Image: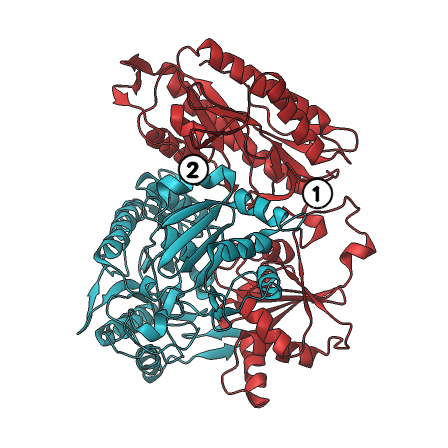
Chain colours: A red, B cyan
Amino acid sequence: MSLRAAGSSDSPALTSPSNRLIIADSETNANLYFATGFLAPDPFIYLQSNNQSHLLMSDLELDRARSQSKVDQVHSYSDYQEKAKSAGIPRPGVADVVHRFILEQGFELDASAEWLVPNDFPLEYGDQLRECGHTLKTKAPPFFENRSLKTEEEVDAIRLAQQGVEATLDEVLDDLRQADIKDGFLYLDGKLLSSESIRRSLHIGMMEKGLLAQHTIVACGRDACDPHNEGSGPLRANEAIIFDIFPRSIESRYHSDMTRTVVKGRATDVLKRLYDTVLEGQMMGIAQVKHGADGQEIHKTITEHFEKQGYETGLRDGRMQGFFHGTGHGIGLDIHEPPRIGKIEQYLQAGEVVTVEPGLYYPEIGAVRIEDMVLVTEDGCRNLTSYPKELEL
Amino acid sequence: MSLRAAGSSDSPALTSPSNRLIIADSETNANLYFATGFLAPDPFIYLQSNNQSHLLMSDLELDRARSQSKVDQVHSYSDYQEKAKSAGIPRPGVADVVHRFILEQGFELDASAEWLVPNDFPLEYGDQLRECGHTLKTKAPPFFENRSLKTEEEVDAIRLAQQGVEATLDEVLDDLRQADIKDGFLYLDGKLLSSESIRRSLHIGMMEKGLLAQHTIVACGRDACDPHNEGSGPLRANEAIIFDIFPRSIESRYHSDMTRTVVKGRATDVLKRLYDTVLEGQMMGIAQVKHGADGQEIHKTITEHFEKQGYETGLRDGRMQGFFHGTGHGIGLDIHEPPRIGKIEQYLQAGEVVTVEPGLYYPEIGAVRIEDMVLVTEDGCRNLTSYPKELEL
């Protein structure tokens, strides 16, 4: 959501000041995992100063952090807790320990020294560290500029995850192809197919391929008209079913993200036209992706295309209809990361991996969303998604 | 980690002031999920004032929040964004929108009015709201006092998850029982068994039962001596293997947590003695759990038992050995929540679900950890774990 100018990742203006501080758990905080390569379920402390990176770890995680993390120095939290006690603090908290560590390490503490923290840095520690005299400055994502620009290795990790998704969706759509239609519902080997049963098959199939998936969307008919509805109940023939699949690789921790819309049986003509319009919009969007392109312009192109085709966006009968979400988002260690392709000016950079996922949602017709992941390059983009786009199964 | 006195959840002193504010995503923020019953991957805004709860939702989530959340009122974020623009802010951010909402809703804004926020409330929004004149006060967990005290329904959800874990571990230990030992390694149907292969079987087995598991520990020999090492490589006969299994129920979102230590083959006498000592310590700990008991005392009892048996704790050859983690933690929507049973004074309350999981770790002997979940009651506790504790398979 933040405004950001395009720029090189090693611009001195962006990387200074060099003091950075994170206090979080790396299971949920991707910045911390990115900086340390170390995964832990409970909060720990990361500091970067003068191009040296430091961790303060509990006794429980100390040895593991020393062997698994990629930071320069791993220190014992309890050592600095003891030092804080010696300095007269009877029950030192996290901020007291950080303060003591900064003093002992002799990081520059002149008036101009400031610590850059993520904008979601915990307020309590922020208050306490400021009381100790430190200057904290929040930074909107990306906290590490180079997190947005993916290395070849990172792109490979995303592609590998995506390959597992495509193989799994193949298995599941084969089931749908073989399913029988009775009274408008779908049956495989006599069993009724539902959003829940298909989601379960997808999750198990992905787990077998080393992918951890949650909240996979398998939404049929009206459910699909609410873009984040996961879908529930029996699947119906001749209605649009949206599959939105965005697992994390257990090994690499990188995500992939793909959406396809299918119909088991025959799509109505109005649904076919909706599908073609979304697909055209997506193609127009992808065609515009390149280094320096403005996400706002890409989003606008798609929006105008939809309007030209007669698909209006807005409230109707108290519900949002049309195209009422962004066109895409960056992806990596987080499923949603900068940049956004949407209503706000934001310039794409070569090396970013972004989704392009327009959709149109009308309860009386159905819903269509189609999503690929592309790698932004100097003169265009490389599509990391190779799954076919076919409406009718 | 916070100091907290035991007390009733409806004590007026704890529930006042009544203004509360959370800005987070409810996928990772259990307080927000607890307050709203609404799951969303991107941040949204929750306010509680005068016993009325409010959500401010993006267009994308507005309809779903209205139908799925349990708050009193769901408002459109973009409506208040427009109002902020009308009030002269050209590009209103999240804090501007919250400020506008508070003004429009006419919440009490006298000098004494303050907003209670979780201690991990985002610093950036905290700074901005204070600049707008609001008083924010951070609160250590539990942010909602009644989150610690589980209802019957919540206890059932935890038990149901635990039943799935026990059924899955049964299947996997049956495989281990049937495995052949060759050259000290384990083979099932000719295939070498490893931490990775067993973890994968556990994860798929749990997924089939509606449980989402990550980082399940299957750690053998020296790996297990590092309590948070997930384990890797081939499993070996006649060495301790620690299974620590803590999935989340996909449907209820509650966790369960259990640890067992087993040996395929024969345990050495020193390992058997280590096992018996940990089991005795765990039984002594469980026997002390009841309403009003001090976690620090429980932890001390176990620590002293271990010392009396000659098992010392501390650094040796630069590594921590002995019993160097807490005895237990609360469990619920988060895998780790208050209270802690460890080195800090903390009084247990009837209705809390806590783990009791002492362990002893010596590279030259092996590692043993045994963990049950218990529900604290007025005069003792109810063990929610019914899985056998047998060392040798």
Q: Is residue A274 above or below residue B80?
A: above
Residue at 69%, 54% in the rendered image = A144
Residue A151: image tag: 1
**Chain ID for label 1?**
A
Residue A112, given in percent of the width and then of the height, sits at 78, 72
Residue B40: image tag: none
| Residue that protrudes farthest toward the right in the picture | A12
Q: Is residue B359 above or below residue A41?
A: below
SS for callout 2: helix
Q: Is residue A339 above or below residue B273?
A: above
Q: Is residue B70 left or right of residue A75?
A: left
Residue at 37%, 55% in the rendered image = B34
Q: Nearer the viewer, residue A347 or A259?
A: A347
Residue B63: image tag: 2
Residue B287, given in percent of the width and then of the height, sits at 21, 74
Label count reads: 2
Residue at 33%, 30% in the rendered image = A197
SS for callout 1: loop
